[in-house]
C-alpha cells in the first residue's frame, strides 16, 4: 500500500512499509456524498494489514506488526480535507492519500509516529498509532485516546504513554 523512508536523522537505512495480503478493492460510487465510514475509507482496499520496519541496506524485515485482528480497510482514493492528507489535491476533491504521515505525537521532538483510522459508524473512530522507536530499532503500537471526532478534518490524537517522562500529549 505504501512505503515511507525514515528521516536520515533517525536511521538512514530504515523504511516503514504498510502492506496487505489478499486485498480486495472496494471502489465507492461517484456522485454520492460521503457517509461517516467513508471519511476514513473513500475507495478502499480490505484485507489483513501489516506494518513492517525494513532494513533497506540489508533488504530484510526487522519487525512486523498486525494492524488489527481480521481485515482492515485502507483508502487508495479519498476526499482531501478529511482524516488522511491527500497531497496535491484541492480540498473536497478525491486523490491518493498519504497513509504514513510521520509526526511528533508523543512530544519527544521526533517525528516518528503515525495513525491509521477506521470510522465504523458516525459515533466511533477506531484509531491505531504506530511509532518507530530508535533506541529499540522497532515499530511499536501505542495506546491512545481520540478527541474531536465530531469533525473528521480536526482529528487529534492524545497518547497515554505509560511512563513518567511522557503523558497525555495531544497533536
Image (spheres, rainbow, N blue to C red):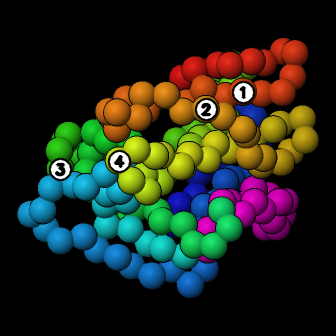
Judging by the rendered image, the residue that carries numbered circle 4 is 122
Question: Nearer the N terminus, badge 1 or badge 4?
Answer: 4
Q: Which residue is mark 1?
A: 160
- Main SS category, magenta section: strand
Q: Contact (CB < 8 A) between labels 1 and 2?
A: yes
In this view, the residue in front, 131 or 83, is 83
Q: Which residue is mark 3?
A: 93
Q: CA distance from mark 2 to mark 3?
A: 29 Å
Disc 4 versus disc 2: distance between alpha carbons? Answer: 17 Å
- Residue plotted at (49% across, 28% down): 147
Which badge, 1 or 2, comes first in the chain's sequence? 2
For the residues labelled 3 and 1, the Cα–Cα distance comes to 34 Å
Q: Nearer the viewer, residue 76 or 87?
A: 76
Name which residue lies at 31% across and 67% down.
Answer: 43
Left or right of residue 99, residue 75 in this image: left
Residue 90 numbered tag: none
Is residue 75 magenta-colored?
no
- Where, by quadrant of the figure, is residue 51 drawn? bottom right
Marks 4/3: CA–CA distance = 21 Å
User: Range of the magenta residues?
Assistant: 48-67
Mark in the foreground, 2 or 3: 2
On screen, 9 above or below 122?
Answer: above
In the rendered image, residue 139, in percent from the top left (x then y), is placed at 77, 49
- Residue 52 is left or right of residue 82, and the answer is right
Amino acid at each position: 500500500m505504501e512505503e515511507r523512508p525514515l528521516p536520515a536523522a533517525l536511521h538512514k537505512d530504515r523504511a516503514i512499509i504498510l502492506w496487505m495480503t489478499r486485498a480486495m478493492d472496494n471502489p465507492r460510487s461517484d456522485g454520492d456524498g460521503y457517509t461517516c465510514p467513508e471519511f476514513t475509507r473513500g475507495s478502499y482496499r480490505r484485507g489483513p494489514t501489516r506494518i513492517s520496519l525494513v532494513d533497506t541496506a540489508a533488504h530484510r524485515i526487522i519487525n512486523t506488526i498486525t494492524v488489527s485482528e481480521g481485515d482492515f480497510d485502507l483508502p487508495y482514493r479519498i476526499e482531501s480535507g478529511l482524516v488522511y492528507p491527500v497531497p496535491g489535491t484541492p480540498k473536497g476533491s478525491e486523490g491518493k492519500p498519504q497513509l504514513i504521515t510521520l509526526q511528533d505525537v508523543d512530544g519527544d521532538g521526533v517525528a516518528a509516529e503515525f495513525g491509521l483510522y477506521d470510522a465504523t459508524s458516525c459515533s466511533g473512530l477506531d484509531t491505531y498509532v504506530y511509532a518507530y522507536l530508535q533506541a529499540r530499532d522497532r515499530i511499536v503500537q501505542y495506546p491512545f485516546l481520540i478527541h474531536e471526532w465530531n469533525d473528521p478534518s480536526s482529528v487529534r490524537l492524545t497518547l497515554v504513554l505509560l511512563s513518567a517522562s511522557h503523558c497525555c500529549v495531544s497533536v
